[in-house]
Amino acid sequence: MNKTERTALITGSGRNIGRACALALAADGVNLVVNGSSDQEACEQTAAMARELGVKAEVALGNVGQEADAKKIAAKALLHFDAVDILICNAAIRPSDAFLEMTDEQWYRVINTNFMGSFWLARACLPGMVDKGWGRIINFAGMNAIHGYNGRAHVSASKHAVWGLTKALAKEFAPKGITANIISPGPIEGERNDLTMAAHIAEMVDRVPVGRLGTGDEVAAACALLASDKGGFINGQMIQINGGAET
């Protein structure tokens, strides 16, 4: 275990990029609070894998897109650990809905999950970081924060919003020893059952100069750096991990 006994809360960490980030931090000796919206088994698997690396790990199930759930997730993290030192907001949804046909409910479901969840959790976790004089906030954007995509106005809007939030937090809390950055992955390998998403990813690969999908471990390596003491001079930045895709 590292000397500082730090703890990370990672949303959407039951599988894919979130799990890779969780295990990368666990390998560095960081305790974990694993979160998913509904897949308890996947989250428990991530937690078990982390414990095998010698750290403490708890599961806090809940939908970050619902304020009450977000507060419960943070409360459970603080119940088991004295503070959340590293907040990684990875959970997101990316549905396709024609702008003139989407309902308010569809719009706000995406905005709340992709943006408001980061807002609610940051407000819950930042006081402990301020008290310690050290903290890391890592949000996730994706290429939807850079490009506008047909049928994804809500996704692009939510990702631009979380990028703006990240930049503002980076300025406000840097004097208190807290950095805030955002990771923007390109097409990444993972468990994808949605045929529409699979077709979209295949199309995106054609725009990646390295000619392949990225891996969760490649994203996790950047996450681990940002979460470490060695990443302390990286602040207010968008780290793009996309194989050189056009932005």
Image: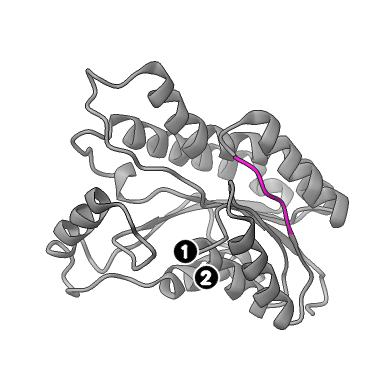
- Helix, strand or loop: magenta stretch: loop
What type is the residue that disc 1 sits on?
Ile
User: Left of 141 or right of it: where is 25?
Assistant: right
Point out residue 238 in the picture as x, y percentages from the top left corner: 41, 53
Q: Name the residue carrying label 1.
A: 17
User: Left of 240 or right of it: where is 178?
Assistant: right
For the record, the magenta segment spans 59-63
Element marked by disc 2: helix
Element marked by disc 1: helix
What type is the residue that disc 2 sits on?
Ala
Point out residue 227 in the picture as x, y percentages from the top left corner: 61, 64
- Residue at 73% in and 36% down: 71
- Dot 2: few (<14), some (14–19), or many (≥20) neighbours within 10 Å? many
- Residue at 50% in and 41% down: 167
Please determine whether, in this image, residue 241 is positioned above or below residue 55.
Answer: above
Please determine whether, in this image, residue 192 is positioned above or below residue 127.
Answer: below
Asked if the residue under mark 1 is in contact with the one under mark 2, i.e. CB atoms within 8 Å, the reply is yes
Q: Nearer the viewer, residue 131 or 43?
A: 43
